[in-house]
Image: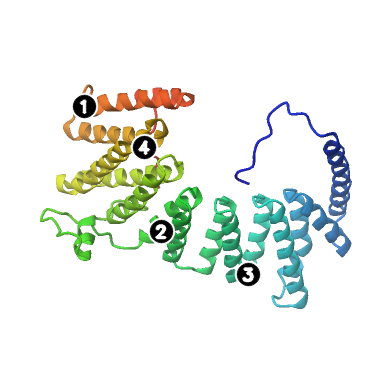
Amino acid sequence: MHGRPRIPLGTPEDPEKVKTSKQRLALFSRLSNEVLERRAARRYDPESMMLAAKLLEQNPEVYTVWNYRREALQDTLQGEHGSEAADAAVKTELELTEAALQKNPKSYATWHHRKWLVQLGVVSLERELKLVTKLLAVDSRNFHAWAYRRFVVERACVPLEEEERYSTDCINANFSNYSAWHARTVLLPQIHAAQPTTSLADLLAADGARPRPADSVPDQAAAPGLVPLWALGQELDVVQQATFTDPEDQSAWVYHRWLLSQLMAHHTASSSKGQAALKESEDMLNQEIMRCEALLESESDRSKCKWPILTLARLLELRCKLTSQQTGTGGQQGGPDQQLIEKLYKELMEIDPMRKGYYTDALEGKANVVTRPV
């Protein structure tokens, strides 16, 4: 779990705890051997299942024992649904997995077993969605629970827009929820995959925010999996709220980097359509540069601004790259952007010396500026 303190190396162990631990290990070893012997003998009687459950409650990660239970229950659960025996077996397995998840909420084997039950079609999807919502309320960054939620949502045909709102609620409750930000990288391409894309100018004009520029060009479907520019604009606004609230938090900046990858993919896809088609993505890039500069100007202690400094350096690198592509100059060596990039990376080496090698590589063009968009 998050927030658990580490025990320093060399800390002397409590003799009583060591003794208790050895006793528990001996009992677990005997129980484990007994259960594995019963599995080898293909014993699927109630006593064997009870011992298997007892073992899993102690250590949910013994995946072989979950396999043992699936072997024992296969005929019952894959037979006629709704029978008294099948209903009782499902109830037992659900209770066992819940007990195991209380022991270890991030047990791969336990989540896999629960997914197996859902795939058999013997579990209420509505109940599962409520359960995983409760689990995420306890630990909102449990990526196993988030993955299971996506699995249930897909099978239950929950509208993706509802899940987008759920991730928004999670982010509003805690900007540091990395998993909720990550969920948006999965949801947004799916939501917009089958929708005709619209330019940011069109959207603002429709909302009455500002008149549509005469030279604005509608954003065409740039590539499969890309989020339309108007939606990227909205997401960048959401990220701005988070980063201006807590510039030190990494989660929103990582998501911002993904949004930049989407933006650059749009720019690449629009490169054959002329300058007008490129202008919107370039304007958005310049807007992000100004936002980072404004954030840094508002902070009195730059030593706590690693992420906005790094992001500004990456944004300037992208602008240099785009300028180089358009002019065919092969880079802007010595230009104002390049000089500022060098200054920013040197500043990062001072405030974050543990990653000095990374910043050195970045200065030499060896570090990836953005992640892959899809």
Q: What element carries label 3?
A: loop
Q: Name the residue under label 4.
A: 308
Residue depth check, mark 4 versus mark 2: number of the one nearer the observer: 4
Q: What element carries label 1?
A: helix
Where does the image place residue 273, in percent across and percent down from the top left?
A: 18, 47
Mark linked to residue 16: none
Where does the image place residue 1, in percent across and percent down from the top left?
A: 63, 46
Q: Earlier in the sequence, mark 3 or mark 1?
A: 3
Where does the image place residue 313, in percent across and percent down from the top left?
A: 32, 32
Q: Which of marks 1 and 2 is nearer the N terminus?
A: 2
The reply to whether dot 3 and dot 1 touch (C-beta < 8 Å) is: no
Between marks 4 and 3, how big is the CA–CA gap? 47 Å
Q: Earlier in the sequence, mark 3 or mark 2?
A: 3
Q: Earlier in the sequence, mark 1 or mark 4?
A: 4
Q: Name the residue under label 1.
A: 336
Type of amino acid under label 4: Pro
Q: Earlier in the sequence, mark 4 or mark 2?
A: 2
* Residue 161 visible to the viewer: yes
Residue depth check, mark 1 versus mark 4: number of the one nearer the observer: 4
Circle 4 residues within 10 Å: few <14, some 14–19, many ≥20:
many
The reply to whether dot 4 and dot 3 touch (C-beta < 8 Å) is: no
Residue depth check, mark 4 versus mark 3: number of the one nearer the observer: 4
Where does the image place residue 132, in percent across and percent down from the top left?
A: 59, 61
Q: Identify the residue shown where x is 41% and y is 24%.
A: 349
Mark linked to residue 190: 2
Q: Identify the residue shown where x is 35% and y is 60%.
A: 192
Instruction: Classify residue 249 by image quadrant.
Output: top left
Between marks 1 and 4, how big is the CA–CA gap? 19 Å
The reply to whether dot 4 and dot 2 touch (C-beta < 8 Å) is: no
Circle 2 residues within 10 Å: few <14, some 14–19, many ≥20:
some
